[in-house]
Every structure is written in C-alpha cells, then in structure tokens.
C-alpha cells in the first residue's frame, strides 16, 4: 500500500502556478531553444509550424486550464508521444551501423515533438521547471548540430530567459510560504526602499553570472580544443543528387562558361558567367597567365583538430605557362559508408603506417565536384555511395555538391618531422621509383637556362632534398614578393622565368610553379597541387572557416619512404609529426579582428590596447564604485548600529565575542568586568541603548562624546 501511495503522491497534480511572468519567461526559453534546433535543419514544415506556433499556444492553454484535471488531454498527449516515437522508428529503420550520425536529426525531431506536446500540460511550477530543464537539453542538441556562430543569439536569449525564470520561480515559491507579521516602525522607510531591496536581492545573481562568465572565459582560454579523431558518428549529408554530366569527369558550375563540364566544352578560365567564388585552378587545366582572385565568400567549414591544406587535385604536366593532368584514368569506388579508397599507387605503402586524421567538410557554397581533404584520403563517408578516384589519389563525386552537403574524410598521415624528411631515401636526393620520376619530373625542352642554373646553384649548397626545398623558399623570400596585383603575362613568355627574373612578384600559382620547375630540374619529383589553405579557426565553433579567397596552389614534393609533402612559402602549416596543441580559444584574437575588416591598420593597435586595458580599468572602476557604495551604506546605517559594531570588534579582538542573547548593556558588563576593565565601556553601551530605544535620539554632542570615549578605549587597547 505504501508503494501505491508513493506513486500517487509522485503523480499528484501540483499546485497551479499563478505567475504569468514565470510562465512567459519559461516559454521564451523553450522557444529560443526550439529556434536554435530548427536553425540547424531539424524537422520539416509541419514540425516547424508545430514548434513555433504550438509551443506558444500550449503555454497559453496550460495557463488557462491550470486548475483543470485534464484526463482527456493526458490521454491525447500519450497517443501523440507514441505516434512521434513510431515516426522516429520509421525514419531510422534504414540506418546501418556505419551511419550512426544519421540518427541525430530524427532523434532531435522526436525530442522537439515531445517538447511541443509537453507544452500543452504545464499547469504547475514543477512542470514549468521541467520544461526549462528540457530546453537546456534542446540547446545542447542544437550545439552538437551547430557548425557556425549563428547559434550565439539563440543561446544568449535562452540564457537570459532561463535566468529570469529561475529568479521568478524562487520568488513564486517564497510567495507560497506563510509571511511573518512585521509591525510598522515609527520612522517608516522611504517609498523607494522596497525597490532598492529588490535590486539588492538581485545582486547575488548578477555576481554569480559575472563569476560564471569570468570562469567560463578562463576555462575557454586553457581548455584543450575538441578533437575530431574519435567521433562516434561521421557526418554525411547530401541535399539532392543532381549528377554531373560526365561521370568521373570534373564539373565546376562556379566557373560558368569555363566549366569543364559545360556543353560548349570550353576550358578557358575566362568564360562568361563565372561566380565570384570560382577559382580557375579547379578545372582540367590551370593557366598561370590568368589573373584575378575569388572573393571573401564562405565556401566551406572544416571540423578538424589541426590545420592542413585541403587538397582538391594536382597537375603534373607543364608547358611553360599551363598546367595539365597527364593521366585522366579513373577508378570507381563506392558502397556503404565508409567508402574504402585505394589511393595513388605510390601512396598505398604509407597507409599502413599513417595516423587517422578526421575532417568533416560542411559545404557552404557550390563549387567543383571534388572531395577536399588532407593528404592522403583513405576512407570517405559520403551519402551518394559512389565516387571516382584519380591516379594522383584525389577523389571526384558523381553528383554536384550543393550548399548543405556534408562529408567526412579519414586521411592517413605519416608522422613526419624535419628530421624524417632530411633522412628520407638514400644518397644526396634519395632514390625514387622510375615510373614516379618519369611522371613528376617532366619539363618542356625549352626550360630557360637561368631557371635551371639558379636551381643548380641552390642545390650545390644543400646536402639533401628537404634542405634544397627550404633553400629555394629562402631565396624566393629574399628576391621576390607576394602580391595579388601583378602585370599580365606577356605572350610567349615563360611564366616561371618572368616571375623569378623579370616581375619578381606574383601570387601562389607563380610561386608554386617556380618551385616545382626548379626541383624537377634537379631530378626531384614534384607537382602542383590546388585546393584551399586551412582558413581561419572560429574559436566559438572549433571549425576552420574556409573562404573563396583561400583557394590556393602549392608545391608537393615526393620523399622516398614518406610520401608527398606540401611546401609553400606563402602559408605556414605544421608538419604532421610536429607537436601541435591548441586550446578552445586558439585563434580568438585573429578571429575578432576579422570581424572588423574596415578598421584601418593604424587604428588596430590603439583599439587593441584599449580593449586590453578595459579589463584592469573596469576592475578598478568596479572597486572604486563598490567602495563608494559601501561608504554610502555605512553613512546610511543608524549611529547605534555602527557604534555597537565597533564595540563588538574591539571585544572580539580581546577574545570575547558578543553572544546572540546579550544586550549591549550585558555585553558591556562582561567586557568591563574582565576583558576590558574600563568603566567607559559601560557608558558607551548605555548611550547606544539610549540612541536605539529612547523616544527621541540623543543630541549630536552626546554621540560625539560616545565616539570620543570609544576612540580612547580603542587607543588604550592598541597601546597595551
């Protein structure tokens, strides 16, 4: 019988909550959490309407029906929860063990439906607090799904609404308790005292919030960045499956009429209709005579625990101006995720010794049908289940990749350090496979003599392949400059010679091409690779935000026993074996600077100094204001309270504190009898009691006399 009673008590309807403000604040918290989840693509149109309109209606209905039992409503809610769960089972019935990530959205939808149904039955305070707790879970779900800072406004609104809800719930609970009768005082407080009391009651809350923010910022600054290498689920999503015209071929709609898959078959990188995000290197050829760079549009986000070059494809044939791919053979790959990739012939040996490097790419702007990843991709989680591998190890899709596409690549990266590269292979520049050498040392017959002579001179100064690469980088850093504003390439001119000895300035295509040609002239296999630089890390999401202007060309050099290694004088990316550690706040300063690109460079140091100084100056201002407030509060306190407190401190220093039941006169007798054998103590206590309880307060002369006596006693104690 006791168990039945306990169940009945647990399920008993709580006292109806009458506070409209509390209900409204909880509703705002729930709606903001719901909006955060919907903003991550959770649910279709029916759920969006039910969540945005239904939750607000549910809270209003719950207030109207808060005194009703609602048995029919509870039955309806039970049926609704069962229907939502059956829909969840139906949506996840085809999910295999390799696609656990596909459970995230259906699970979030189920939770949202439960939230909508629950909003119809929140009559009591405990029900509202349960809704507040469930909104916290919903915010966490949105945080898991979020890949951008767009979650921030929802989170801010939710935090404010949740804080207000907790304060109002506490006040509502206090209002339910019996109140003590307080007799009116003769000297009533001013009419604004209750307002001041309410403000004072909120100060601990504001202090707690400030402390939480300070601790949060401190933890944010030292907490290690979240890794991506041990994810339980590997995201993959494809909004639609529009196939490319040529299966296995390259398609890049952002190039407009110069798209390799365009019907007219043009391959010029100056075709009409080119998007501002289109990069001429993502084509079947790359003409180094082309000028112009993509804009600042965000093209993709990458979730990875360290930066790298996000490779798209490589070129191996050079004619003095244009790069092409000599081997267009493809190998279809596919199946259930993960799709196992074979890789380039020369890369297969490193797969056994490499370390997993997981990258999840979130496409923000449609571009080429290339799978961007770090070297060298081994497993691919992709929703289309069919891709094509090129002989250089890069991957193309059979469908276009529109905005909203998501795929995950697990690359195998050998733990390479500078020492490993210096000792790679045998002999001065190492021993390479003849087929690899033939493909990646190709040069036209008319390579300018001063280009090869420069490479030979730099090679004589170096004992190994790695140091030669670094020597070339140092020479170019000292004798050329990087700029986006370079003159047109003259007709018939060799692009590398023009860059090294005539213009002596250029951007990544000219720089990387010069390095490849000089290395090849020394018999070292090298190739030009195009893709994206790492981008900028968003410390609030942990994602690398890659923009169209990050489209990049760099040099890859072959090291026997190690594999291809990227080099680029214009971008610094750590080697795979180099220690790389970052905390959650890594990149915070540069990211904040990027939010204000229009601030002149001369103003930035001043603004930075002001922001840095704002913290100590704010702390000093807070201390000054707090001290002034304490002085005002001290001045507003009754003279008797202040004087008695001074007397109590004096007695406590002598080892005798005042007991709670002792009157000022009793306490003074104890002090005068043993601790402070000074009759003036009794006089002080008598004046304090007279000031506190007499019909009229004593004159200023009497108070001044008591203060003088107390100062004398304090001085005598200090001198003894």
Image (tube, grey):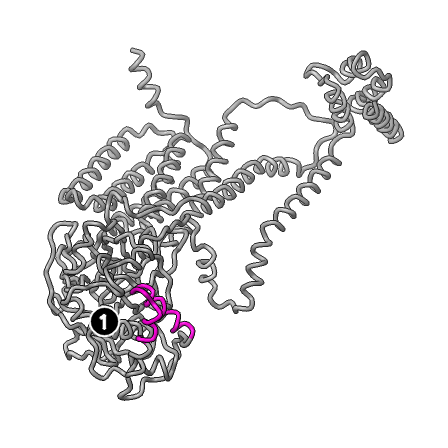
Q: Position of residue 392 (x, y in %)?
A: 18, 64
Find the magenta span and give its range: 455-478
Is residue 522 in sight in this rendering? yes
Quadrant where the C terminus sits is: top right
Numbered disc 1: secondary structure:
loop
- 169 and 89: which is toward the camera: 89
Left or right, 352 with reference to 648: left
Relative to 385, does residue 318 appear above or below in the rendering? below
Most foreground residue, 21 or 377: 377
Q: Is residue 426 left or right of residue 208?
A: left
- At 15% from the left and 73% from the top, the residue drawn is 326
Residue at image position (24%, 61%) is 559
Q: Position of residue 90 (x, y in %)?
A: 15, 42
* Magenta-colored stretch includes residue 230: no
Structural crowding at the residue carrying mark 1, measured as other residues with C-alpha within 10 Å and reported as few (<14), some (14–19) or many (≥20):
some
- The residue indicated by pointer 1 is 523
Task: Inspect the magenta stretch and tell me whether residue 457 lies in it.
Answer: yes
Quadrant hosting residue 440: bottom left
> Residue at position x 40%, y 33% from top?
129
Closer to the camera, 257 or 527? 527
């Amino acid at each position: 019988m006791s168990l039945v009673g306990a169940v009945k008590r647990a399920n008993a309807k709580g006292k109806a909550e009458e506070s409209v403000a509390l209900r409204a604040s909880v509703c705002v918290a729930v709606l903001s959490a719901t909006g955060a989840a919907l903003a991550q693509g959770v649910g279709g149109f029916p759920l969006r309407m039910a969540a945005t309109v239904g939750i607000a209606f549910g809270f209003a209905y719950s207030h109207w029906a808060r005194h009703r039992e609602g048995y029919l409503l509870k039955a309806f809610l039970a049926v609704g929860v069962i229907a939502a769960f059956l829909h969840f089972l139906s949506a996840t019935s085809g999910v295999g063990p390799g696609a656990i990530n596909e459970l995230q959205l259906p699970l979030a939808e189920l939770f949202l439906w439960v939230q909508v149904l629950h909003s119809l039955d929140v009559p009591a305070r405990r029900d509202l607090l349960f809704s507040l707790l469930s909104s916290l879970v919903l915010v966490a779900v949105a945080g898991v799904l979020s890949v951008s800072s767009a979650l921030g406004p929802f989170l801010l609104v939710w935090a404010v609404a949740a804080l207000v809800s907790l304060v109002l719930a506490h006040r509502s609970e206090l209002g339910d308790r019996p109140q003590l009768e307080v007799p009116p005082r003769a000297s009533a407080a001013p009419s604004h005292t209750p307002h001041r009391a309410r403000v004072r009651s909120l100060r601990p809350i504001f202090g707690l919030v400030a402390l939480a923010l300070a601790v949060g910022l401190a933890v944010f600054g030292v907490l290690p960045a979240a890794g991506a290498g041990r994810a339980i689920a590997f995201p993959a999503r494809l909004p639609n499956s529009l196939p490319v015209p040529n299966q296995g071929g390259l398609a890049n709609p952002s190039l407009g009429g110069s798209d390799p898959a365009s019907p007219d078959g043009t391959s010029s990188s100056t075709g009409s209709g080119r998007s501002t995000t289109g990069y001429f290197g993502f084509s079947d050829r790359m003409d180094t005579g082309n000028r112009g760079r993509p804009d600042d549009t965000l093209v993709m986000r990458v979730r990875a625990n360290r930066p790298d070059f996000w490779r798209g494809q490589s070129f191996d044939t050079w004619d003095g101006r244009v790069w092409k791919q000599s081997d267009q053979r493809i190998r279809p790959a596919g199946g259930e995720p993960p799709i196992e990739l074979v890789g380039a012939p020369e890369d297969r040996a490193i797969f056994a010794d490499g370390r997993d490097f997981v990258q999840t790419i979130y496409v923000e702007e449609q571009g080429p049908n290339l799978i961007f990843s770090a070297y060298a991709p081994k497993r691919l989680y992709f929703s289309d289940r069919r891709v094509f591998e090129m002989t250089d190890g890069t991957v193309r899709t059979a469908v276009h990749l529109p905005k909203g596409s998501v795929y995950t690549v697990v690359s195998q990266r050998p733990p390479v350090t500078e020492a490993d590269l210096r000792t790679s292979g045998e002999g001065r520049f190492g021993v390479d496979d003849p087929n690899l050498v033939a493909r990646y040392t190709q040069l036209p017959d008319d390579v300018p003599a001063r280009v090869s002579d420069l490479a030979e001179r730099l090679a004589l100064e170096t004992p190994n392949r790695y140091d030669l690469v670094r020597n070339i980088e140092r020479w170019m850093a000292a004798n050329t400059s990087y700029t986006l504003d370079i003159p047109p390439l003259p007709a018939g001119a060799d692009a590398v010679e023009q860059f090294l000895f005539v213009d002596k300035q250029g951007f990544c295509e000219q720089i990387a091409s010069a390095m490849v040609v000089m290395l090849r002239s020394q018999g070292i296999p090298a190739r030009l690779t195009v893709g994206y630089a790492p981008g900028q890390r968003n410390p609030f999401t942990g994602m690398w935000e890659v923009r169209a202007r990050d489209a990049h060309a760099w040099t890859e050099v072959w090291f026997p026993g190690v594999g291809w290694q990227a080099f680029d004088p214009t971008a610094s990316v750590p080697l795979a074996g180099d220690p790389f550690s970052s905390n959650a706040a890594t990149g915070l300063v540069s990211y904040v600077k990027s939010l204000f690109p229009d601030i002149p460079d001369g103003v930035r140091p001043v603004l930075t100094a002001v922001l840095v100084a704002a913290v100590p100056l704010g702390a000093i201002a807070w201390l000054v204001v707090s001290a002034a407030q304490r002085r005002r509060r001290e001045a507003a306190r009754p003279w008797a309270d202040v004087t008695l407190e001074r007397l109590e401190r004096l007695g406590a220093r002598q080892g005798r504190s005042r007991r709670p039941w002792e009157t000022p006169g009793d306490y003074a007798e104890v002090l005068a009898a043993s601790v402070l054998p000074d009759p003036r103590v009794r006089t002080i206590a008598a004046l304090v009691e007279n000031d506190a309880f007499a019909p009229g307060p004593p004159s200023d002369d009497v108070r001044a006399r008591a203060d003088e006596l107390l100062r004398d006693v304090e001085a005598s104690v200090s001198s003894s």
